[in-house]
């Protein structure tokens, strides 16, 4: 019987975020595989933590899921607790917005 690989906490949290993002975007493993140029069974293995993802794969997954590597890797914490509730609500709404809406908002903010 094959021994299951024990994942470290950071890897587990990253995989949880990828799966959450896939669910939010209604993206299946098969659809993600097509975006990444790999078969569904390979995506399934990556989402189980075996083999360990390369940085290139993490970047590709972030792009395919319309998110950032920082979000997936939990690199920075934006201090949501320190923001006013209305600002938190805006950030959460932005996070849930479709890619086209995000582009429009980004353009508006750059003006």
Image (cartoon, rainbow, N blue to C red):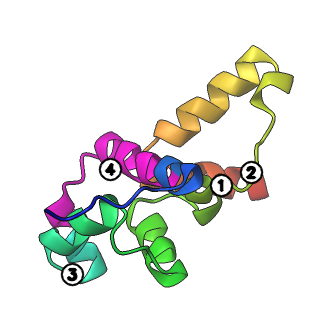
- How far is disc 1 from disc 3 in space, using C-alphas? 31 Å
Residue 41 place in picture, x, y as percent: 14, 70
Which label lies toward us, 4 or 1? 4
Q: Residue at 58% of width from left, 61% of height from top?
A: 68
Q: Could you tell me if the residues under marks 4 and 3 are in contact, i.e. CB atoms within 8 Å?
A: no
Tag 3's secondary structure?
loop
**Relative to 23, 53 lies left or right:** right
Q: Crowding at label 2, few (<14), some or many (≥20) Cα neighbours within 10 Å?
A: few
- Mark 2 or mark 3: name the one nearer the start of the chain: 3
Q: Which residue is mark 2?
A: 109
The verdict on residue 25 being magenta is yes
Q: Which residue in the protein does label 3 denote? A: 38
Look at mark 4 in the image and give the residue it sits on. 22
How many C-alpha atoms fall within 10 Å of the one at disc 3: few (<14), some, or many (≥20)?
Answer: few
Q: Which quarter of the picture shows residue 94? A: top right
What is the CA distance from the residue labelled 4 to the residue labelled 1?
22 Å
Where is residue 79? Give x, y as percent: 81, 34
Marks 2,1: beta carbons within 8 A:
yes
Q: Is residue 83 visible?
A: no
Considering only order in the chain, which callout, 3 or 1, is on the residue closer to the N terminus?
3
Residue at horizontal 46%, vertical 47%?
17
The disc, 4 or 2, on the residue closer to the chain's N-terminal end is: 4
**Element type where label 2 sits in the image:** helix
Residue interval drawn in magenta: 14-32
**Residue beneath label 1, please?**
106
Instruction: Mark 4 or mark 1: name the one nearer the start of the chain.
Output: 4
């Amino acid at each position: 019987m094959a021994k299951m690989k024990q994942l470290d906490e950071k890897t587990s949290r990253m995989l949880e975020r990828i799966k959450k993002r896939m669910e939010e975007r209604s993206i299946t493993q098969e659809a993600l595989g097509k975006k990444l140029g790999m078969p569904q069974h390979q995506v399934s293995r990556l989402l189980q933590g075996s083999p360990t993802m390369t940085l290139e794969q993490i970047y590709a997954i972030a792009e395919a899921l319309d998110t950032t590597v920082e979000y997936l890797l939990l690199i920075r914490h934006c201090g949501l607790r320190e923001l006013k509730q209305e600002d938190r609500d805006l950030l959460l709404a932005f996070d849930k917005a479709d890619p086209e809406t995000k582009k429009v908002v980004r353009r508006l903010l750059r003006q």
